[in-house]
Image: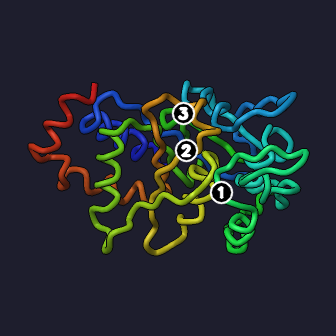
Amino acid sequence: MDIAFRDYFAEQWKRYFKNAELPIVFFYSKDLHGVELSPKPKGHSCLICDLKKVRNGTSMAFGEHNIGCGGGSHYAGFAQKIREDFEYFLSCGKMGTEGERYKQDPETVRLMMEDFPTLRKQDHWLIFKRWDQLTDQDDPEVAVFFARPDVLSGLFMLANYDFVGHAGVISPFSSGCGSIILYPYQEKDKDKARSVIGMFDPSARPCVKADELTFATPFNRLKQLSEYMDESFLITNTWKTMHKRLD
């Protein structure tokens, strides 16, 4: 991690977004980087809730055996198989399986899963750090902002600033953890990397504030976007009006 860029972005962020929360980042590594291993949950737990500690400044590592949700473990790349009867779990349910009713019927789920992206990271640690905790030994791959609407609008417009087309930002159907891990990670090596707005999953929303969504973007894309801040709409009177109420 380039420490000069870490500090530069923090300064730029404060200039244009005041005291809005800096992002957290994640990367995969075979080394723990001196990070605290997340405690193994005793029962079911949501990864998004676990990230509250990271947002408060405690760096954490997750692996194959310390994510308390089968879906979270799958979307993080540690479990290749999804739960049995997943098509019923996500839709109408069946005897012995309560349905979340996020999809109309099991067949809709089965068709969706035919081209569902996956990760394979069983031999890695998934390390989360808050922006100001990054060191020169870290190699962040994705940055995740927990943002309110005004901040989200700024990030959205910035992500489309140099993007040729109408979809520099996407919002695929996903769990909360899928929207901040799986989908933005899939974008990181693309020529036209897109950012991802997420946290629409009602099952994960109790872990964030009522007026927060997430904006996740590949780290290399964030470096590109930071270069445009001083020439973009962020220097206009339009943004100055927004800037006044960011507190």
At 89% from the left and 48% from the top, the residue drawn is 95
Vertically, is 197 above or below 37?
below
Q: Amino acid at mark 2?
A: Val
Point out the tag, 2 or 1, that comes first from the N-terminus.
2
- Residue that carries the numbered disc 2 in the rendered image: 25
Vertically, is 138 above or below 158?
above
Answer yes or no: do the residues labelled 3 and 1 have beta carbons within 8 Å?
A: no
Please tell me whether mark 2 sits on a helix, a strand or a loop.
strand
Q: Amino acid at mark 3?
A: Gln
Instruction: Looking at this view, name the residue that lies furthest to the left.
Output: 237
Vertically, is 89 above or below 113?
above
Q: Is residue 220 visible?
A: no
Alpha-carbon neighbours of circle 2 within 10 Å: few (<14), some, or many (≥20)?
Answer: many
Q: Where's residue 7, x and y in %?
A: 39, 39
Tell me the quarter of the picture where residue 174 sits.
bottom right
Q: Where's residue 136, x and y in %?
A: 55, 44
Side (left or right) of 84 relative to 185: right
Along the line of sight, the residue nearer the viewer: 18 or 90: 90
At 55% from the left and 39% from the top, the residue drawn is 135
| Front of the two marks 3 and 1 | 1
Alpha-carbon neighbours of circle 1 within 10 Å: few (<14), some, or many (≥20)?
Answer: some
